Each structure stands twice: as C-alpha cells, then as structure tokens.
Amino acid sequence: MQESHWRSLLKGLSWRVGGSLATVFIAWIFTDDFRISLEIGGVELLSKVFLYYIHERLWLQIPWGVGFASAAHAGSSKGSQAKTS
C-alpha cells in the first residue's frame, strides 16, 4: 500500500484539530486565560502533527501486516490471512 506524504500530513492534521480543541479547553480551565490556552493548543497541534507524520511514514516502511489475501483462498478461513510481502 502506498500513501502520499500529503495524505499522511492531512490525516495527522484532521486528527489533531479535535485533540487540540480539547487541549485548549482544558488549558483554559486550568489557566483561566484564553490567550495562553490558545498558545498551548497551537504548540501542541504543530508538534503532534509533526510527530504523527513521522510515525506514519516510519510505519509505511514496515511490511508486516500489509497485503491482500490471494484470490484462491479469499473465502476460506485458512487462507484469509493477508500476505506480508
């Protein structure tokens, strides 16, 4: 399976937007300062999108667990395991 760099980046960004909104809200509760909570959320968003992107790209280098079942065994219980090459 191939995935473009842009797809990996956008997946990370879409996931983190929701998480960062939660972080902003929690930081606002603790700091009682919305500006500071936005700064915390911004730093958290950028750092975690970058880390997620690296994580995704590294996992794409690992062939384990990626593949398709052969057509001859697609319906059987013995042959339903994916090939790893």
Image (tube, rainbow, N blue to C red):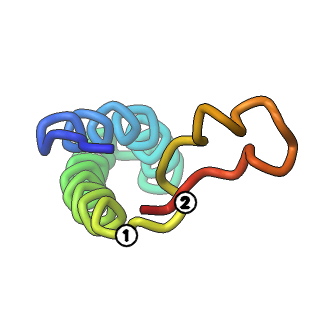
Q: Quadrant of residue 31?
A: bottom left
> In this image, 80 relative to 23: left or right?
right
> In this image, 25 relative to 41: left or right?
right
At 49% from the left and 39% from the top, the residue drawn is 22
At 60% from the left and 32% from the top, the residue drawn is 71
Q: Position of residue 66 (x, y in %)?
A: 48, 54
Indicate whether 64 appears above or below 30.
Answer: below
Q: Position of residue 73 (x, y in %)?
A: 71, 39
Q: Quadrant of the N terminus?
A: top left
Of 37 and 64, which appears nearest the observer?
64
Amino acid on which disc 2 is placed: Gly
- Look at the numbered discs 2 and 1 and tell me whether their residues touch, using CB distance below 8 Å: yes
At 52% from the left and 42% from the top, the residue drawn is 68
At 36% from the left and 64% from the top, the residue drawn is 59
The disc at residue 65 is 2
Q: Position of residue 30 (x, y in %)?
A: 51, 55
Q: Position of residue 34 (x, y in %)?
A: 32, 39
- SS for dot 2: loop
Of 23 and 14, which appears nearest the observer?
14
Q: Quadrant of the C terminus?
A: bottom left
Please tell me how crowded label 1 is: few (under 14), some (14-19), or many (20+) other residues with Cα within 10 Å: few
- SS for dot 1: loop
Q: What whole-number distance in Å separates the C-alpha atoms at marks 2 and 1?
A: 8 Å
Please tell me how crowded label 2 is: few (under 14), some (14-19), or many (20+) other residues with Cα within 10 Å: few
Residue under label 1? 62
Amino acid on which disc 1 is placed: Ile
> In this image, 84 relative to 79: left or right?
left
Indicate whether 76 appears above or below 52.
Answer: above
Of 65 and 11, which appears nearest the observer?
65
